Image (cartoon, rainbow, N blue to C red):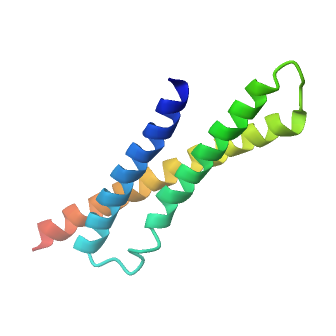
Amino acid sequence: MRWTFDVIWPVVYTGFLLVTTAYLAKKIDCKFKEKVLYIALVAMMFDFLENIIATSVMMIYPTRLDFLIYMLISASILKWVILSGAFVLLGLLLIRVVFRSKKK
């Protein structure tokens, strides 16, 4: 059950970010419209990496491998920083679309 949510949730938020960011970037004719989509994909990649490492740590539980724990922490921090950046970018695109529509 846990892995079901860990697979579905990244796909859901990545789909939302990809569709919404692509729509807004196309609407304002952004120069970087293809490149901004990679941000959401990289966040999803780190989310899956975090899930894989967490599962590995739980599978070898009595044994403690510190490098795996550090990798887990690093993947988690990178996921949240990149995901936050993707949502900030989405907000900035939305603000730009609103201001462009007000000008017209």
Q: Residue furthest top?
A: 62
Q: Is residue 55 left or right of residue 30?
A: right
Which is nearer the eye, 34 or 90? Answer: 34
Horizontal and vertical percent for residue 102? 13, 66
Which is nearer the eye, 12 or 25? Answer: 12
Q: Is residue 66 left or right of residue 34?
A: right
Horizontal and vertical percent for residue 71? 78, 42
Which residue does the image show at 32% across and 66% down from the upper left? 22
Q: Residue furthest bottom?
A: 31
Horizontal and vertical percent for residue 40? 47, 56
Q: Is residue 64 left or right of residue 25?
A: right
Which residue does the image show at 89% across and 32% down from the upper left? 65
Tell me where residue 53 sits by quadrant: top right
Q: Is residue 100 above or below residue 42?
A: below
Which is nearer the eye, 35 or 98? Answer: 35
Horizontal and vertical percent for residue 10? 47, 43
Which residue does the image show at 35% across and 54% down from the upper left? 91
Q: Is residue 104 left or right of residue 54?
A: left
Marker count (numbered):
0
Which residue does the image show at 27% across and 65% down from the upper left? 24
Q: Is residue 50 above or below residue 30?
A: above
Q: Is residue 41 above or below residue 57?
A: below
Tell me where residue 61 sits by quadrant: top right
Quarter occupied by the C terminus: bottom left
